[in-house]
Every structure is written in structure tokens, then in C-alpha cells.
Image (cartoon, rainbow, N blue to C red):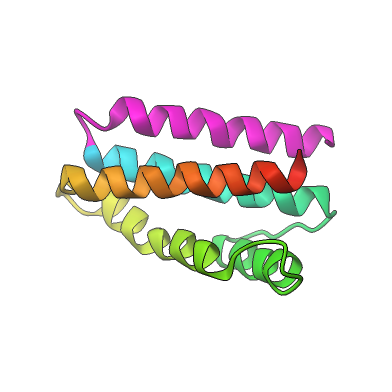
Amino acid sequence: MSPRSAELASAARRRLLTARAALPADTSGAVSAAYYAMLYAARAALSESDVYARTHKGTWHELRRVFVESGRLDQDLVSRAQRVQSEREDADYEAWSFPAAEADRVIALAEEFLAAIEGLIA
């Protein structure tokens, strides 16, 4: 794995740990951290293919182009991960807390997404 991919994968794992740790006290923070775990994992996978994007939208677009269209990554999984972006925006910019069950669902999705990405770049 390239040093940049390893750095991004490590950041993804750290964010996932942060999401789990935050869950009991800060569900919005947990959702935000879980989303960023998925974003960094996506960027790690793209980095291994020497593809880079500047924006969140660009990252998801390139992930689909490189990995979903080739059949190497499940389309539904990527779609579910990308949809968390709007939840993350609510978590970061609105003054309300996510229901714990919803935050737990997002974290479980992040765990599934990271496992799939790690399977690609291991």
C-alpha cells in the first residue's frame, strides 16, 4: 500500500473508533465521524489507483467510476455510504442530536464500508 493510502486508511480507522467512542454522549458527533471514516476510506482506495478528488462529491463519483463500474465494489454499499453525507451535514450544522439507533446504524454502515475497502486495498 502506498504511504498516502496507508495514511488515509489509518485516518479512516481512527475516525471509526472516534465514532464508536462518541456514540453514548454525542450521537451527532458519532455520525459525523462515521461519515468521515467512509470518506477517508474511499480516498484511500482511490489513492491506490492513483485517482484523486478534491471534493466529497468528486470522491464518491470517482469511487463509482473506478470500483463500482468495474464490479469490484457493491453499488448499493457505495450509495448507502454516500447518502450519509446529508446526515453528516445535519450532524455538523444543525443543533439537534440524532437518535441513538440512527447513529448506531451509520456506524455499522461505516464498519461494513471500511471492511469492503480494506478488502480492495489489502
Residue 21 at x, y = what percent? 33, 25
> Which image quadrant: the N terminus?
top right
Relative to 18, residue 41 above or below = below
Q: Residue at x 52, y 28 (%)?
A: 14
Residue 22 in the figure: left or right of residue 58: left
Q: Residue at x 67, y 41 (%)?
A: 118
> Which image quadrant: the C terminus?
top right
Q: Is residue 8 magenta?
A: yes
Asked if residue 36 shows in the view, the reply is no
Please, what is the dominant secondary structure of the magenta stretch? helix
Residue 13 at x, y = what percent? 55, 31
Q: Residue at x 41, y 65 (%)?
A: 83
| Range covered by the magenta-colored residues | 1-26
Residue 34 at x, y = what percent? 42, 43
Residue 52 in the figure: left or right of residue 59: right
Residue 19 in the figure: left or right of residue 104: right
Asked if residue 120 shows in the view, the reply is yes
Q: Residue at x 66, y 38 (%)?
A: 8
Q: Quadrant of residue 53?
A: bottom right
Relative to 3, residue 54 above or below = below
Residue 54 at x, y = what percent? 66, 59
